[in-house]
Amino acid sequence: MSTDILRELAAILEARKSESPDSSYVASLYAKPDKMLEKIGEEAVETIIAAKNEDREQIIYETADLWFHSMVMLAQKGLSPDDVLNELARRFGVSGHDEKASRK
């Protein structure tokens, strides 16, 4: 189910590219890329605050917002959740230290 909802959402986000910014929140973000990036930062901060406050429900809510806005950015850049999932799969079973060192 989890990857299905990501793919379904990605399809909706792709369709919003042709919508008017006046009629679609997502289209309004596509029209203002800096605002879209600001929203990712805002949601990241709100997720951190929720985690520091140990508020389980707020962590889930804010993380959903962070993922959503990140997916809007991915779609705007022509990327999909599968691109990110494939990268996570590539890293699976590799030490975080080793993976980070391999990027140099």
Image (tube, rainbow, N blue to C red):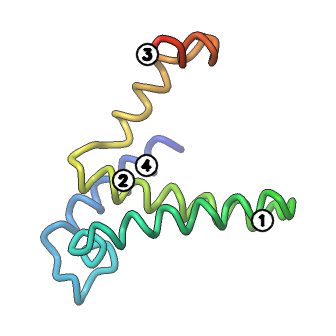
Task: Report the residue marked by disc 1.
Answer: 57
Q: Disc 1 versus disc 3: distance between alpha carbons?
A: 38 Å
x then y, percent, for residue 23 = 24, 87
* Residue for point 16% across, 82% down: 20
* Residue for point 53% across, 44% down: 2
Taking depth in this image into account, of 94 and 38 the one nearest to the observer is 38
Kind of residue at badge 4: Leu
Q: Tell me, yes or no, whether the two marked residues, 1 and 3, touch with CB atoms within 8 Å.
A: no
> Looking at the image, is 100 positioned above or below residue 19?
above
Q: Tell me, yes or no, whether the two marked residues, 3 and 4, touch with CB atoms within 8 Å.
A: no
Kind of residue at badge 1: Glu
- N-terminal of the pair, mark 3 or mark 2, is 2
Task: Report the residue marked by disc 2.
Answer: 8
Task: Report the residue marked by disc 4.
Answer: 6
Mark 3 or 2, closer to the camera: 3
Mark 1 or 3, closer to the camera: 3
Taking depth in this image into account, of 31 and 20 the one nearest to the observer is 31
Q: Tell me, yes or no, whether the two marked residues, 3 and 2, touch with CB atoms within 8 Å.
A: no
User: The residue tagged with tag 2: helix, strand or loop?
Assistant: helix
Q: Disc 1 versus disc 2: distance between alpha carbons?
A: 24 Å
**Residue neighbourhood size for the residue with mark 1, other residues' Cα within 10 Å, grouped as few (<14), some (14–19), many (≥20):** few
Task: Report the residue marked by disc 3.
Answer: 104
User: The residue tagged with tag 3: helix, strand or loop?
Assistant: loop
Q: Disc 2 versus disc 4: distance between alpha carbons?
A: 5 Å
x then y, percent, for residue 97 = 63, 15
> Looking at the image, is 37 positioned above or below residue 74?
below
Q: Tell me, yes or no, whether the two marked residues, 2 and 4, touch with CB atoms within 8 Å.
A: yes
